[in-house]
Image (cartoon, rainbow, N blue to C red):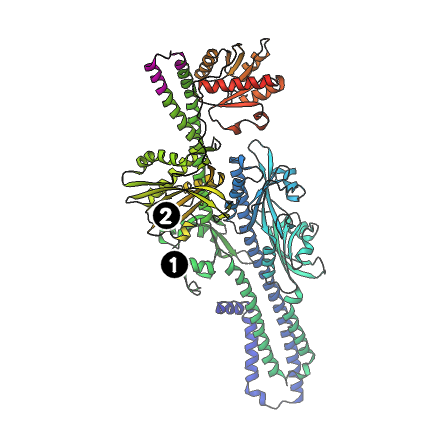
Amino acid sequence: MPDQIKARADHRRGPRQAGIVDAWTRFASGSWMDRRWTPWIIVLSGLVLALLCDAFVAHMLSVNYRETYRTTEAANGDLARALEEYMLRNIQGVDVLLNTTIDSLKQDPSLLTAGNPALINELKRRVVPYPAAGGIVVLDADGNLLGDSAGNGVPGRENNFADRAYYKVQRDDPGRGLFIDVPVASRVNRGRFIAVSRALMMPDGRFAGVIVVAVDYENLRQFFLSLNVGQRGTVTLYRDDGTILLRTPHADDFAGRNVRSNRLFSLYLPRAPHGSFEGSGMTDGTSRSISYRRVAGLPLVVTVARDPIEYLAGWKNNALYYSAIAAGLNLLIAGFGLVLARQWRLRAASEQALRDNFEQHLLVTENVPALIVQVGADGDIRYANRVAREWYAQPPSGIGRSRRIDDYIDPARRGEVRPKIEAALAGRTAGGEEKIAFPDGRERWCETIRVPDRSQDGTVRGYFVLSVDITERKRIEDELRQAQKMEAIGQLAGGIAHDSNNMLAATLGNLDLLLDALPPGESSRRSMVERAIEAAERVADLNRRLLAFARKQALQPQVTDVNQLVRGMTTILQRTLGENIEIALAQDPMLWHCLIDPTQLQNALLNLALNARDAMDGGGRLTITTTNAVLDQPLDDGDERIMPGDYVTIAVSDMGAGMPPEIARRAFEPFFTTKEFGKGSGLGLSMVYGFARQSGGTVLIDSRVAEGTCVTLYLPSAGPGVGSRARAGAARLARPQTGERILVVEDNPLVGAMASTMLTSMGYGPVVVTHATAAIAALERSDPFALLLTDILLPDAMTGIDLAREVRRRWPELPIVFMSGFADPSLVPEELRATTALLAKPFRLGQLSEAIVSALAGRKAI
């Protein structure tokens, strides 16, 4: 590398300058200098030498000045370009984080609640792949903190940021897109940060809040300070409206100052996105050489400025020295040898200074985390940075000027790469994404751009190759598509379960009516009806599992006998795992009961059993152990703590290959899997962990290579109590036969007919309509109704919720009972939950009777 720098320095000095020095050397070594000259000839020679010296001095000062200025300008431009790439890479990564977070929150608006652990965990997971992001914060539409990746936002602690500029800007102009704020002090953590924000707009166009990513101000300031621009030089980061975000040195004195009236923003930026000019400092008025670049696609501008006192110091020394020579012309002949030696020493110092400057330029390109290669028009490599050498597994001097770019292109890809090279040599920028297997053994997705290398006269003398590793970004995109596919499957399962519940509602209702109509002596027929009811109930339970999988049903904790649940699952697990897997149970007969959702616990045990089966490829023993555990101190699972208390533990152990510690630590991460592609989504263990944490417990994993794995669930104990109350059957509640009229709103004719028959059998007078408009018309008639029984999902534009709101406004005393195939309490808005009831489809005759009698009793109590 030093030889390359020296060759370039000799080329810049030019043959004429070298020729003058050689001529003087030959002149000084000539033997005719020993001859005796007459005074006139000596005077004449002195005058000639003085004139030659003056001309030489003027020429050298002019060349040196131009060279010093061009070198400084090039150094500023290179450093500004490197700063642009640095900011572009970091802020674009932050913007990707903002956009993907916004998309995720749009898809799951239920996360947008203050202190929601799921929201905080989602933010923590998303911020990990972006080192430039110090944290991510979600604010609601009023500027209140909902949560951040540092764990802030817990209920009971109010934090409002409505006075922050990044909130006001996004609130007042949600469509402006990305906004970068000036450095501010954090209110929840120590230190300062630069806020990068976007507005959170819901699909209906409603402003729902602001998503903010905090970029660490101190780290960015230290990076700017590490750049070598001299003692009096400056490096500045502006917003494109002229506001200073960061300036070194004295960063804190300038942050937030708006200088849009200076020449950079009023004159040069409107002309070109990058360039150089002479400008005056904001504090001392000193003229500086300034290079600027607008960061592509972002509202940012970077500048690099050097003080002429520093970069012209060597030139001024030369000027003073040569002026002294011209003033001492009468001593020129006597001291010519010393002057020549001195000149050579100064030239060496100038070359060293040039070499130092050039190495400073290389320092930036060598440390940029991207492949950078300069190729000449002849195909020879002029320069390759550290990343290029590492990717191509070359020693520090392995990619040099003697190698051609074709030596490093895979022959199978030359047909693809050659048109892009020809485009760059023709003066056009060519870019795109490429998947390349590099000699270092890694296959990378790269975003590659080839930019023409133009000389000052516009001639294309080669091109630059810039390639950034985007493999991680591609992986995240693939994971996002997998998550979307899982969401689609969940929606399909939820829709099937909803429609099936409608059919089961009609089936169970008519079976209840039939059973109620049969006399007690018809034991054979009653037995057949009861078996049909039992079969329908099992289908309804299957539908509840489908709704739980689709996350259309909230957790329903019940006091559960875990031993009984595990024993009941043994047959299903044996059928699922296959004959080569032996299932062993080790249950504590004094096991406490759990306050848990039994359906979700069954799903968790099934996930753990399937993982154990995959680990024991050739067969083995699966052991499920249940015990009581009393924690005297908090238990740390590596992420959060569970409090001391009584817990029930369920341990699922296998005899598989096991996992090393570094793999076991990541086992609960979403999408992380050791299975082959297509054989696992990486969501099973993360779903088990989320269920345990939501239930007030946790999950621990213990795995050893070649010995097996044990996954232990800690679930909160409910003591030795009894299980939950059985569901109501066909028995109806006693009520006075007063014949109240009930308005039924149901678009499914089978369910509507079944409800009408049930209500008639209970002594009510039902009126069935199929949509909300007909229901309002029926209520407006003179005959009053005692109760409204309506489905939540109705045809046309008006849903059952909309109908209930209209009824509450016009007939506030009328009791309302909702029906739904989803059975999710969150479907009922908060303002209606206290004065309404929700009846899950399919329902039994007794459940319908209980809901109506309770609703009518509540009205009479009022």
Quarter that holds the C terminus: top right
Give the mark toward the camera: 1 or 2: 2
Local secondary structure at mark 2 = strand
Quarter residue 350 falls in? bottom right
Amino acid type, residue under disc 1 in the picture? Asp
- In the picture as drawn, the residue positioned furthest to the bottom comes out as 36
Q: Residues within 10 Å of mark 2 (few under 14, many from 20)?
A: many
For the stretch drawn in magenta, the main secondary structure is helix
Q: Nearer the viewer, residue 662 or 401?
A: 662
Instruction: Locate residue 143, reporting x and y percent.
Output: 64, 40
Look at the image and say whether residue 215 sits in the magenta stretch: no
Name the element at disc 1.
helix
> Which residue: 48% across, 46% down?
631
Q: Which residue has dot 1 on it?
A: 407
Front residue of 693 and 21: 693
- Residue at 43 percent of width and 35 percent of height: 600
Please rate how many residues cluster around mark 1, counting C-alpha atoms within 10 Å: few if below 14, some from 14 to 19, many from 20.
few
Q: Which residues are magenta?
A: 514-531
Residue placed most toward the observer, 513 or 85 = 513
Outermost residue, top side: 782
Residue that numbered label 2 is attached to: 709
In terms of sequence position, does the residue under pointer 1 or pointer 2 come before the other? 1
